[in-house]
Image: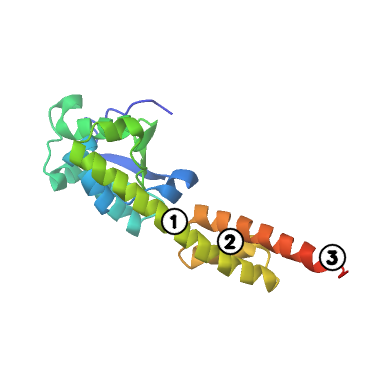
């Protein structure tokens, strides 16, 4: 993979593919979310964030990738695509790659994330004092919600395991019910360990 965005100046189209990352996808945020609007906007800038949002909407319809008409895309965002490799649209692509929201595959193909990762510590420090406080509070609330969701998912997983379903099947079922893959995996592991403890305790003969 090339470390920078390709030079799309002079090209009419580019192939856009989803950049998948199971770990980040499980903990990240949609580009159209309040989190992205509040915390990523000051870091990325408006044109790059709107580009990510536009791509996310295309992925909703074409999840395996699509061909982007570059002039049409830049016009829809209200930014310039003429003026060579340093035009505003090209700079947005470079910022997208520079902030790990995408990566170059070849001279006409770009992978772009459908899910934005949480800000890392250095990026949080670049926010205003007010936004830093809001980010801290938002992360605390999310962690609390994830713990609550994980606890509920673990109870459901334990019941399904007791009924004889396999761990893989239980995990798939939780995901199909809307539990994120990461928490679903953790919930099944926790439930499996609880079931093993219960089975061992029930197998001990009474004194």
In percent of width and height, residue 122 lies at 32, 30
Q: Label 2, label 1: how many angstroms apart (C-alpha)?
A: 16 Å
Element at badge 1? helix
In percent of width and height, residue 87 lies at 15, 29
* Lower position in the chain sequence, tag 2 or tag 1: 1
Give the vertical position of 164 relative to 65 (above or below).
Answer: below
The answer to which of 34 and 149 lies nearer the viewer is 149
Q: Is residue 57 left or right of residue 143?
A: left
- Count residues near mark 1 (Cα–Cα under 10 Å), then give few for <14, some for 14-19, many for 20+: some
Residue at label 1? 146
Residue at label 2? 171
Residue at label 3? 204
Q: Label 3, label 2: how many angstroms apart (C-alpha)?
A: 29 Å
Q: Residue at x 27, y 53 (%)?
A: 33
Q: Nearer the viewer, mark 2 or mark 1?
A: 1
- Count residues near mark 2 (Cα–Cα under 10 Å), then give few for <14, some for 14-19, many for 20+: many
User: Can residue 69 be seen?
Assistant: no
Q: Is residue 16 left or right of residue 193?
A: left
In the rendered image, which quarter is residue 157 located in?
Answer: bottom right
State yes or no: discs 3 and 1 in contact (Cβ < 8 Å).
no
In percent of width and height, residue 22 lies at 49, 47
What label does residue 74 carry, if any?
A: none
In percent of width and height, residue 124 lies at 29, 35
Element at badge 3? loop
In the rendered image, which quarter is residue 3 located in?
Answer: top left
The answer to which of 176 and 84 lies nearer the viewer is 176
């Amino acid at each position: 993979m090339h470390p920078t965005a390709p030079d799309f100046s002079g090209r009419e189209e580019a192939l856009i593919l989803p950049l998948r990352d199971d770990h980040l996808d499980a903990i990240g945020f949609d580009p159209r979310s309040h989190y992205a609007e509040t915390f990523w906007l000051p870091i990325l800038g408006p044109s790059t964030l709107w580009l990510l949002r536009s791509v996310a909407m295309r992925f909703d319809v074409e999840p395996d990738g699509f061909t982007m008409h570059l002039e049409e895309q830049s016009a829809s965002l209200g930014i310039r695509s003429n003026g060579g490799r340093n035009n505003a649209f090209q700079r947005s692509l470079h910022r997208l790659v520079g902030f790990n929201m995408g990566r170059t595959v070849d001279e006409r193909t770009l992978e772009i994330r459908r899910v934005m990762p949480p800000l890392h510590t250095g990026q949080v420090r670049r926010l205003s004092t007010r936004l830093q406080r809001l980010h801290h509070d938002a992360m605390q609330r999310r962690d609390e919600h994830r713990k609550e969701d994980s606890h509920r998912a673990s109870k459901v997983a334990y019941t399904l395991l007791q009924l004889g379903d396999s761990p893989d099947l239980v995990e798939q079922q939780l995901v199909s019910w809307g539990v994120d893959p990461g928490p679903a995996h953790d919930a099944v592991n926790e439930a499996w360990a609880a079931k093993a403890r219960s089975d061992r305790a029930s197998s001990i003969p009474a004194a």
